[in-house]
Image (cartoon, helix red, strand yellow):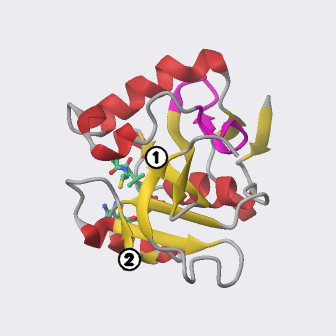
Amino acid sequence: MPYANAVGPERGGIDLELSLEQDDDWWEVEALFDHAFAPGREALSSYRLRDDVSPVKELCLVSRDETGIIGGAIRYWPVRVGGAAALLLGPVAVHATRQGEGLGRLLIEASLERADDWERVMLVGDAPYYGRFGFQKLKDVEMPPPTNPDRVLGRELRPGAWQGVTGPVEKWAGT
Ligand SMILES: CC(C)(COP(=O)(O)OP(=O)(O)OC[C@H]1O[C@@H](n2cnc3c(N)ncnc32)[C@H](O)[C@@H]1OP(=O)(O)O)[C@@H](O)C(=O)NCCC(=O)NCCS
C-alpha cells in the first residue's frame, strides 16, 4: 500500500517509495535495525516501553528502492509522560549504503505529517541530528535508567503541548 511516491523535488528527488509498514515487513525492518544499531539494541531501556505494546501502525513507514530493497524505516510507539499521551519516535534507521541522501529526513518528516491525532512526540537520540527537525531537550522528562538525560528530546505537535508535561516516561496502558 504505497503512502507517497518519494520521487520529485518536494521529496528531494529520492528514488525510494514510502509505504506504511505491513505485517509482512516486520522481520525485514528488524534486520535493518539490527544492522544499523549496535548488537543488543533491545537491551536499551526504551525497549521496555515497547514490550507487549503495539506500535502506532499508521505512522510506521518503510522505504524501498525500485528493486524492492529496503532503504530505511521508522516506527513509533505510544507512551505516557506524567499521564499525558506522547509518541515515542524510533527506531529509525537508514541502510548504510543510503545514508546522507535525505532519507532519514524524509522518513521523520513524512511520518510526523501524519501524526494529526497526537500532541507531542519524544525520542532518545542525538540532539545535533534531531535539532534540525525542531526537537529539543526535555528537561523534566525522565526515561527509564540508564538513559543520558541530554538525549531525551521532544517536539510539540500542537503549540504548548510539552508545557507542564513532566515526570517519568511510562508504558502505554490503553486510552
Ligand atoms: C541517523 C540516520 C537515521 C540518518 O539518516 P540519513 O538518511 O543518513 O540522514 P539525512 O540524509 O536525512 O541527513 C544527513 C545529515 O545528518 C547528519 N547526521 C546523521 N547522523 C547524525 C548524528 N547521529 N548526529 C548528528 N548529525 C547526524 C549527517 O552528517 C548529514 O549532515 P549534513 O546534512 O549536514 O550533511 C542514519 O544515519 C542511521 O540510520 N544511522 C544509524 C542508526 C541511528 O543512529 N538511528 C538514529 C537513532 S538516534
Residue found 30% across the figure and 33% down from its top: 42
Asked where in the image residue 49 lies, by quadrant, the reply is top left
Find the magenta span and give its range. 54-70
Q: Residue 128: where, in percent of width, then height?
A: 34, 74
Decide whether residue 60 is among the magenta residues.
yes
Nearer to us in this view, 162 or 62: 162
Residue, disc 2: 140
Which marked residue is nearer to the observer: mark 1 or mark 2? 2
Residue found 71% across the figure and 76% down from its top: 158
Q: Residue 23: where, in percent of width, then height?
A: 64, 19
Q: Residue 8: where, in percent of width, then height?
A: 74, 56
Decide whether residue 28 is among the magenta residues.
no
Check disc 1 and give the amino acid type. Val
> Regarding ligand 1, which quadrant of the image does it lie in?
bottom left
Residue, disc 1: 92
Note whether 90 is above or below 31 in the view shown.
below
Residue found 27% across the figure and 72% down from its top: 150
Check disc 2 and give the amino acid type. Asp
Is residue 106 toward the left or the right of residue 92 in the image? right
Give the Cα separation between the discs numbered 1 and 2.
Answer: 24 Å
Disc 2 is placed on an element classified as loop
Are dots 1 and 2 in contact, CB under 8 Å? Answer: no
- In which quadrant of the rendered image does the N terminus lie? top right
Disc 1 is placed on an element classified as strand
Q: Residue 109: where, in percent of width, then height?
A: 63, 61
Asked whether mark 1 lies closer than 8 Å to ligand 1, one says: yes
Nearer to us in this view, 87 or 62: 87
Is residue 24 toward the left or the right of residue 116 in the image? left
Is residue 169 toward the left or the right of residue 109 in the image? left
Number of other residues with Cα within 10 Å of mark 2, as a class: few under 14, some 14 to 19, many 20 or more: few
Q: How many marks?
A: 2
